[in-house]
Image: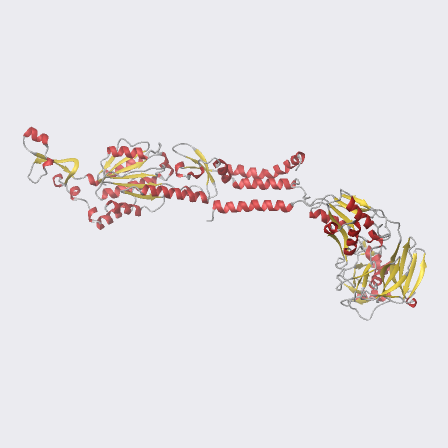
Amino acid sequence: MPDASGLLGAVGPVAAALAPVALLLFVALRLRKRVYYPHELLSPKDDGRPAAALFRSLRLHYDTAIDAACAVIVGLAIAGYPGPALWKGPATAIDASRSMLAGLRGDRPLDEAARLLFSDGTLRGQAVFTLGWDPLTRRNTVRDVTEALEDADSPQEFAMALESSESFMSADYGLLSELSRRGYGGLTLLTDDASAEGLGVDVRRLSAKPPRYLALASAVWDDERERSVARFVTAGGAEIEALWELIADGSMRRAKPEDYEIIPSPSGFELSFKGQGLWAAQWDGRRLPFAAPGRPEPLSASGALSKRIVAALGSIGTKARAGEYGIVVRDGGGAGARGFVSVSRVDEEPYVLPPRLTRGAVVAAGMDRKADLALGESSFASPEAAIPFYLARAASGAAVAPAPRPRASPVRVGEGFLYAAAGGRRAFVVVPPSDEYAPSGRRTVVEAGTVPDRRLLVALALASLYGLKLWLAARLRGRR
Amino acid sequence: MTFIDPECAAIAAAFARRDFRARLPDSIAAKDPMYRRSGASYDLKSIREYQPFDDPRAIDWKLYGRSDRAFVKEFYDESDDEVAFLVDSSASMGCAPVDEYRTFIGSMAYILLSLGMGVRLWTFSEGLSRRCVAARSKNAGGHASIAAALSALPFSGVTDTARSYALWRARGRQKRAFIFSDFHEPGLTLRAPPSGELFLIRYRTPFSALVERGAEAEVLDPESGRLVVVPWSASDEDAWLASDAARDAALAASPRSFFRRLDPGSPRAPVYWDVLERLYA
């Protein structure tokens, strides 16, 4: 029910919208025609009925009446009426990320969240959703698990149901706004993320466990050692127990000692391999799949400027092609194309190269919207100008080749998913982000999002009124 | 102004050629009154001695008492050749194009005078005018007097057709009467004179000619002075047409009556012809 003060605020917009309607009414009254005619010759159908005056006025001014109604609706819409529709009531969202499974069974944040849903009276009866990740589409999702909660007899059963239905890779708190858009209000988020702060969301922090993890920090090709190196960080005393080689169909076999070298490092350890491959490190009974990248392809060139650049970099290829894994430097347009770095020559260099291409190095650049790199005199003179090409080449050698959409069903491998080779693409693995193991310490603001105004309702009302107007116009005025 | 349509002379001539009965009767055409046909009018023709072939009922017994001889009175036969025009001169008629209204009545009178009929014209609004204008010929000032009376129509006052017609029935002796009016009074019923005929000519302006569809109008009643605001839509027009048709049907349903509606601007010659056809039927 709108409050009186809110309605008072709507007076201004409504009055402003009604002003032209009143003006039109005034003009119509001024232009009304006067004729002399015997009243007895007019149709007497309006006379004698109690409501004749009202209907007569409506028929006289139906145009103005409908315009005034539309003006009131538009004015109220401007003033924020009708208010957001929270017709579905409150809802609870459960963080279904990897960190929710940290700890021993029964003592994990997920188990605590399940117990909370069964014991907390304020959460009982609410719709329950999970913020998870879909391995098929590789997108974050928000999924209704209210039925699973209703079907479960105990918190343990509910937690097990979630474990079987969710991938527990990562969560996107931004999807809470989707719940608001669907009409849920009074959102509660159950999460173990201590950095999450709610804005319009009641964040219930679950007890986080002491960090104990083994996570992949980087996997690159080491040109000097001629080996593929995967570096891991560990915490809480986690250690690698075994190394498995992943087969494309998702099966695993124990790695042979000659297949790898393991070297301890201050933060953990590093594994090096002779070439590219898919592996899984086992710790605390868990398996973390990872990909060891292969040797990147040399740069190829297409065009005179590109050939000079690649020749200067010392790794010119024999032919230019749009490679799956190599990088082609080409002249002219096509900015942002996968497998290509387009370059152009410019005279002025008031800008720097995009940080994504230089890893933050300040490299002077010109401005050419059609090319990735617009190079001028100072760019060519700078030794840092080689950075973008080096980084592009290094990225092209990664075994985790980005695939827009996997063609085969992913296979669960430990804490990640293995996507089999398909369509000429290499197999690759997807693992939870490192934040799921080691908190980044960054503050995360969880917003409920804005509930959309009921514009459809307003639009329907306006459409109905104008439809009525057209119908009345056709009925009362007729067609000549 | 003469208020005569240019085609009136041709209509009268054509009708006279077509219908033998429409020619001038001998009783009217004879220059010597003694050769004019005797009849049952109140216009005395002669007094002569009773003859064996005379009707004994025609004997003037007063003369017989004074002179002891039987005499009979002869009257002219002219009553059937005069028609009465009752012309609505109320304020409501002023809403229509009045010159067209006058011209129609003047033309009708001209045609009838051309065919040898006499015309006696009364005006009415609340009641019948005390004086009437009589014309027996289109020449010799006959039609001029009609035209003068039409020019002098005041177009004022409130219409009371029923009362005016009753007053005429008390005064007039014509068996055929024409009433020119808009007949806007609801529930109006008029009965033809005994053994006569009543011609009702309805002349009114359609309201749709005054106001466009979808517009609204302030309608001032010229007789009552009341002002109402009227929306005018397709449905209003349909309702108006229906009620107007019902009014026409009610007027046309009177026995021994002839009804025609005449809209402003519509051709008048067919109406003249229809009237003549009915008059000489």
Q: Quadrant of residue B161?
A: top left
Residue at the limit of the structure toward the left, as seen here? B68
Can you see residue B153? no
- Residue positioned 26% across, 46% down in the render: B278
Q: Is residue A153 left or right of residue B81?
A: right
Q: Residue furthest bottom?
A: A318
Return the x and y of residue A345 as percentages of the image width and height. Answer: 79, 61
Q: Is residue B77 left or right of residue A215?
A: left
Q: Residue at x 57, y 46 (%)?
A: A464
Q: Residue furthest front?
A: A153
When asked about the image quadrant of residue B45, the answer is top left
The quarter of the image holding the N terminus of chain A is top right
Write the residue at 78% across / 52% down: A157
Can residue A381 be seen here? yes
The spot of residue B222 in percent (x, y) is: 39, 34
Q: Residue at x 69, y 48 (%)?
A: A182
Query: Residue B104 location in percent, x, y?
Result: 31, 42
* Residue A182 relative to residue A351: left or right: left
Residue A228 falls in image quadrant: bottom right
Colour mapping used in the image: secondary structure
User: How far across and how far down the image is residue A458, in percent?
Assistant: 62, 44
In the displayed structure, B126 sits above or below A333; it is above
User: Residue A182 or B226: which is nearer the viewer?
Assistant: A182
Number of marks present in the image shown:
0
